[in-house]
Amino acid sequence: MATSINPFPSLGNSVTLSPLHDAHGRNVRYLRLSVTDRCNLHCLYCRSVEQRDFIPHENILRYEEMARVVRIVHGMGVRKVRLTGGEPFARKGCDDFLAMLHKRHDDLDLRLTTNATLLEPHIPLLRRVGVSVVNISLDSFDRATFARVTGHDLLPAVLAAVDGLLKAGLRVKINAVALRGVNDGQLDDFVHAARTLPVDVRFIEFMPMGSGTRWDERHFWPADQIRAGAERLVRLLPDDDGGDTSGPARMFRIVGGKGRLGFISPLSNHFCATCNRLRLTSDGNVRTCLFADKEYALRGMLRTPGLDDSHIARTISRACRLKPVGAELLAARQGAAVAAKHMVGIGG
Ligand code: SAM
């Protein structure tokens, strides 16, 4: 159904935009915005230390260009925007960008996914701009394992940031990529964190992303096995909160504990039917599914003088209509990796 409010008053009444939806009946309400492909860590499941082929600076969208895309999709019904990367705070000016988005769209649910190694000084800003939940990628509470996974000995900085966020009254979700042979022997550390801290600790199944990320079926640790392991340590009660704050995770309250455990299982129990996401890569492409390399180029359009927003909106709308079902792509891969682009470029 077309919106009755024209989100582009400057274009007159001729432009009417439909909310974003796809051919499978899914409504797109959530934008993941990769602000940079640069990251100060080199996680073995994401981009290994040898890979240094960054997107050239001139091909990375400027903040104003990203803000314009946010304005357009906001007019098409998107109400949640997550900054991701690369590492968002590895790009200069990320603070000002967050503040700009908040000022222009105070109804946006602004979120952040970060490795938290650079986060601590930015916590007051996050509060000011109304970021209420921060997702932190943390794959081990053991310093040596953390260094092995990320290539850097920075666990203390992450733990200090978690502490700072909780003290500042922000919600924290800790996301751990489940890696057999790497962190599967540390389940009790994760359970301990979720029991003693008011945080969500969520395991993400290792996804077979391509581009030399050391994907290997032998590292796959399925969500059901993690949950069974956790249930040998604590009693879990289902605690889904209607989908919006838990996203694709199945959440469980720990009886007698402060936090929750969650499981995100893109492989063993996919959530494609309820996927409401759209991604904007740092080089300005719309990507509608993590597992499909089909992207729709916006950068050229954003940089064409005089091209009005309605053209960009139409491209985004068409991309959304053609949003694939990622589980079908995964099912067809026969054990191989999918997606040629680095996760740091896509935004996870
Ligand atoms: N630098 C930020 C961070 O560390 O959270 C944001 C970018 S990172 C690419 C976003 C998310 O992608 C992280 O939660 C990371 O754990 C996840 N990720 C990257 N590669 C993955 C893979 N192969 N399987 C599962 N999750 C992956």
Image (cartoon, rainbow, N blue to C red):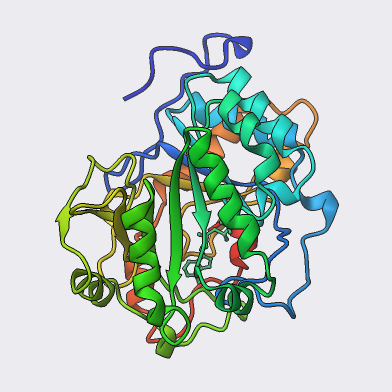
Residue 46 vs 252, above or below: the answer is: below
Residue 44 vs 326, above or below: the answer is: below
Quadrant of the snapshot with the N terminus:
top left
Name the residue: 30% across, 48% down: 258
Name the residue: 69% across, 71% down: 152
Which residue is nearer to you in this view: 194 or 286?
Answer: 194
Name the residue: 63% across, 30% down: 124
One can see residue 37 in this view: yes
Instruction: Tally the numbered discs.
Output: 0
Q: Where does residue 37 sit, x and y in percent of width and height?
A: 70, 57
One can see residue 249 in this view: no
Q: Where does residue 6 sit, x and y in percent of width and height?
A: 49, 13
Which residue is nearer to you in this view: 92 or 164?
Answer: 164
Q: Where does residue 134 sit, x and y in percent of width and height?
A: 50, 43
Q: Where does residue 72 sit, x and y in percent of width and height?
A: 56, 28
Q: Is residue 133 left or right of residue 201?
A: right
Where, by quadrant of the figure, is residue 120 drawn?
Answer: top right
